[in-house]
Amino acid sequence: MTRVVEDNTVTKLKPDVGLRLQQRREVADKLGDALADAFRLSFNLQGLHWNVEGPMFFSLHKLTEEQYEKIEASVDEIAERIRALGLPAPESLQALDERSIIDDLPRAADLRTRVERIVDDYENAGQRLKSIVALAESSGDIKTADLLTSQLGSYDEFAWMLRATIAS
């Protein structure tokens, strides 16, 4: 029987990933936060990508495209890890919005302010990832820790690239 799961209940999948049910629930819940942040980062980068104008158009247009494409791939990986833990991934925009620590980009702000805001968002999302990595490691969930450590490295690199692009 196929069913859609909309809350944090365990599905019929009974994974044997070496974690107790409570550990899987805790890690999956925090992965949902990481998923929401990645989703919002990707969306904000696409908005900047579509609307960038001026002397930095080409470089920012290309850079933001590379970044949102990589983040979109990570969104899928994070959601699939939640499922591999035997729990449902968030599947509504409302759920993602409520969980994310990242807000929409300010539309009226100048380009530099918008890019600086994305840099800040990368750094804030990175701090959150560090706490989730610590939880995963303390639970013995090496796969999740590895996945998010890689994501953290990407966020650090992406923030640096944007910072360097707008440097005066």
Image (spheres, grey):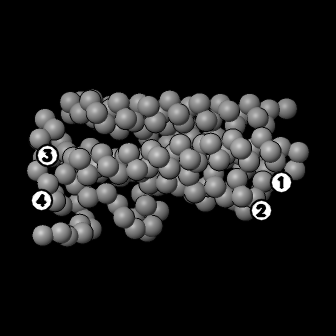
- Tell which circle, 4 or 1, labels the residue nearer the N-terminal end: 4
Check the image and report above or below for 3 versus 142.
Answer: below
Which quadrant of the structure image shows residue 147? top left
Image disc number at residue 53: 1
Q: Which residue is mark 2?
A: 108
- Tell which circle, 2 or 4, labels the residue nearer the N-terminal end: 4
The answer to whether the residues at label 2 and label 4 have Cβ atoms under 8 Å apart is no
In the image, 35: left or right of 145? Answer: right
Distance Cα–Cα, label 2 vs label 4: 47 Å
- Residue 157 at what x, y percent from top left? 59, 30
Residue 13 appears in view: yes
Image disc number at residue 72: none
What amino acid type is highlighted by mark number 4? Lys
In the image, 18: left or right of 153? Answer: left
At 35% from the left and 51% from the top, the residue drawn is 79
**Pointer 1: residues within 10 angstroms few (<14), some, or many (20+)?**
few
Distance Cα–Cα, label 4 vs label 3: 9 Å
Dot 3 falls on a residue whose secondary structure is loop
* Quarter of the image with the N terminus in it: bottom left
- Residue 151 at what x, y percent from top left? 46, 36
Check the image and report above or below for 167 versus 53.
Answer: above
In the image, 79: left or right of 2? Answer: right
Distance Cα–Cα, label 2 vs label 1: 13 Å
Distance Cα–Cα, label 1 vs label 3: 49 Å
What amino acid type is highlighted by mark number 1? Glu
Q: Which residue is mark 4?
A: 12
